[in-house]
Structures are given as structure tokens and as C-alpha cells.
Amino acid sequence: LFVVPTEDVENSEVAALPLDTQRNIEADSFWCMSKLLDGIQDNYTFAQPGIQNKVKALEELVSRIDEDIHNHFKRYEVEYLQFAFRWMNNLLMRELPLRCTIRLWDTYQAETEGFTHFHLYVCSAFLIEWRKEILSMVDFQVQISLVLHT
């Protein structure tokens, strides 16, 4: 992969780079996106079975690693699909700043099962990080707001 010689990727102006550099970036971006999509194609087909399966897997994982959070969601009728669908569909791009997304996706690419398995652990880590807040809330809308907008 080609490396852009700058520390501040978020604020870099691609158009200011030499044309050969832009083409290398485009080719590398295409290769990375193709590799990413190869492993998660079923996320974006009819009925999105990949996302449905990953949300169920997240629910099962959380039920094993933190039964209190899982039971709290059940008690207040918070369905994992209501917040985790977006996490799986957008791969946390809406929840994290770009620099963090780039670092996270780089890790996913390095892992053999990064987007298919490791992503579940990252999502469950968010829930564990917000454990105290989640368990203190009894209002459905507030819980959903926390997990969607934190």
C-alpha cells in the first residue's frame, strides 16, 4: 500500500497530491474495499442475512460475557437489532471519528476474521464500557439513545 506523507490524514487535501500519488491511493483504496466486502457480502444482499446473523451473535456473546447487561435489555425490551443493526451495517463509521475508524479498520484488515468475528468483540466492548450507564437506565428511549449516540 502507498503511504501518504502526512501526519494529519483527516485534513489532507488529496487533490493537492501529485497525480501518480492520487492514482496509487485510488488503487489501494479499491483493493482494500474489495477485500473488506469479500468477507461481508451477505451484509448487503436481500434481507441482509449477514447483519441479522451478526446481531444475533452479538446478543449471544453479550449474554455470555455480561449477563446483567443482557438481562437488563430483555427486562426493558431493548432489542439488539434496534441499535446493533447500525453498528453492523456501517461498521462503526457513524460512532467513531475518522481517525479511529481508520485505525480500527486497519486492525480488521490485519485479522483473518476481522470484519466477521473481531467486529463482534469491538461492539461488545462498547456495551461493557457503557455498562454502568446502561444498568442505571430504565427508560427505553434513553437506553437506545445511549448506545446509538455515545
Image (cartoon, helix red, strand yellow):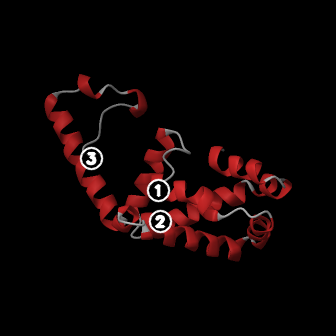
User: What is the number of callouts on the image?
Assistant: 3
Residue placed at 46% from the left, 56% from the top?
Answer: 89
Q: Quadrant of residue 136?
A: bottom right
**Furthest-top residue in view?**
16
Task: Tell which of 74 and 88 is nearer to you.
Answer: 74
| Amino acid residing under circle 2 | Ile
Which mark identifies residue 51? 2
Task: Tell which of 119 and 16 is nearer to you.
Answer: 119
Q: CA distance from mark 3 to mark 2?
A: 23 Å
Task: Tell which of 8 and 14 is nearer to you.
Answer: 14
- 72 with respect to 5 (left or right): right
Q: Which image quarter is the C terminus in?
A: top right
Q: Are marks 3 and 1 in contact (CB under 8 Å)?
A: no
Q: Residue 11, position in %: x, y?
A: 41, 27
Residue behind mark 1: 89
Q: Mark 2 or mark 3, which is nearer the start of the sequence? A: 3
Residue behind mark 3: 29
Considering the numbered disc 2 on the image, is that residue within a helix, a strand or a loop?
A: helix
- 68 with respect to 9 (left or right): right
Q: Where 111 falls versus 92 (above or below)? A: below
Q: Mark 2 or mark 1, which is nearer the start of the sequence? A: 2
| Amino acid residing under circle 1 | Asn
Q: CA distance from mark 3 to mark 1?
A: 19 Å
Q: Nearer the viewer, mark 3 or mark 1?
A: 1
Q: Are marks 1 and 2 in contact (CB under 8 Å)?
A: yes
| Amino acid residing under circle 3 | Ser
- 14 with respect to 50 (left or right): left
Q: Are marks 3 and 2 in contact (CB under 8 Å)?
A: no
